[in-house]
Amino acid sequence: MAERVILEEKSYKTVYREGNSIIKEFTPSHPKSNVFNEAYIHTCVEESGVPVPKIQKVMPADGGWALSMEYIHGKTLQQIMDEDPENLDRHLEKLVDIQLEVSAHRIPKLRNTRYKMEEIINGMHEIDASTKYELLQRIHGMKRHTRLCHGDFVPSNVIIREDGSYCILDWAHATSGNAGADAAITYMRFSLEDPVKAEKYLRIYCRRADMAIQYVQSWMPIVAAVELSRHVEEERELLEKWISVAEYQ
Ligand SMILES: Nc1ncnc2c1ncn2[C@@H]1O[C@H](COP(=O)(O)OP(=O)(O)OP(=O)(O)O)[C@@H](O)[C@H]1O
Ligand SMILES: [Mg+2]
């Protein structure tokens, strides 16, 4: 049997490589429906022609459930950026090009981004009723689109093969909706890690997408509230600052 190499360990899952497969093994307390839902979304995207690792199996593992998918040879864009910081702009442009190719796809059977965000925000106890009202109004004011949104489009979720082709990971949060919201999520992720990189990303994205920077920014209170619902303590202060923008407009 092939050796098992652990790539990522989180409280609710372990990601490891075994030969030509990547196994995402979830803890027994992780809902079975979440695992099957991730497999469902991922296979919808796989069938749409977006380059993703092929799902091989959904299987019971150690009292919980696991997904097995094809192992993709290459480097993540995160690794490439870390190894070659001098060419950050070029790598960000690559990230944006790939993101625009994703949002050119439509998979209407995926959950609608706005409904998902509304449901999360409605159920939150971390924000007061007035802020919630403002955020929900803001969502209603957004145009209705049906673009494929990844939901966590960050450099560590993009693998570049040696021949330059790419493959995108982690489809658990994908929805059908506004590309601007997906760009806002990427911008937020960069901002939490490195504000300079975040501003660069936003400028490149908006130029290439021909989208107003203000439009992406108008999604920030919403995507920050959704992120706040995940309760990552280190992120709280910055997220609350973004959410508070909604209260004054
Ligand atoms: N199919 C794959 N082929 C090659 N490497 C992979 C594959 N799936 C995952 N990896 C590697 O493992 C790392 C972690 O995997 P993954 O993105 O699925 O988990 P995660 O980032 O912890 O999930 P999430 O972003 O949902 O919190 C990736 O950044 C990548 O380096
Ligand atoms: Mg990932």
Image (tube, rainbow, N blue to C red):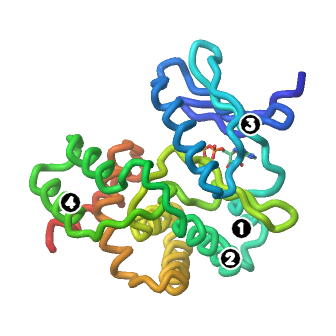
Return the x and y of residue 132 as percentages of the image width and height. Answer: 16, 54
Dividing the picture into quadrants, the one containing residue 56 is top right
Residue nearer the viewer, 139 or 177: 177
Q: As shown in the figure, which amino acid type bears the numbered disc 3?
A: Ile
For disc 1, the marked residue is 81
Q: Secondary structure at mark 1?
A: helix
Which picture quadrant has residue 26? top right
Residue 156 visible in rendering:
no
Residue 216 visible here: yes
Q: Which mark is residue 88?
A: 2
- Across and down, in percent, residue 245 comes to 23, 69
**Mark 1 surroundings within 10 Å by alpha-carbon count, few (fewer than 14), some (14 through 19), many (20 or more):** some
Type of amino acid under label 2: Leu
Residue at 48% x, 82% y: name it: 206
Q: Does the residue at mark 1 contact the one at mark 2 (Cβ under 8 Å)?
A: yes
Marking on residue 103: none
The residue pinned by badge 4 equals 135
Residue 72 position, x and y percent, is 79, 48
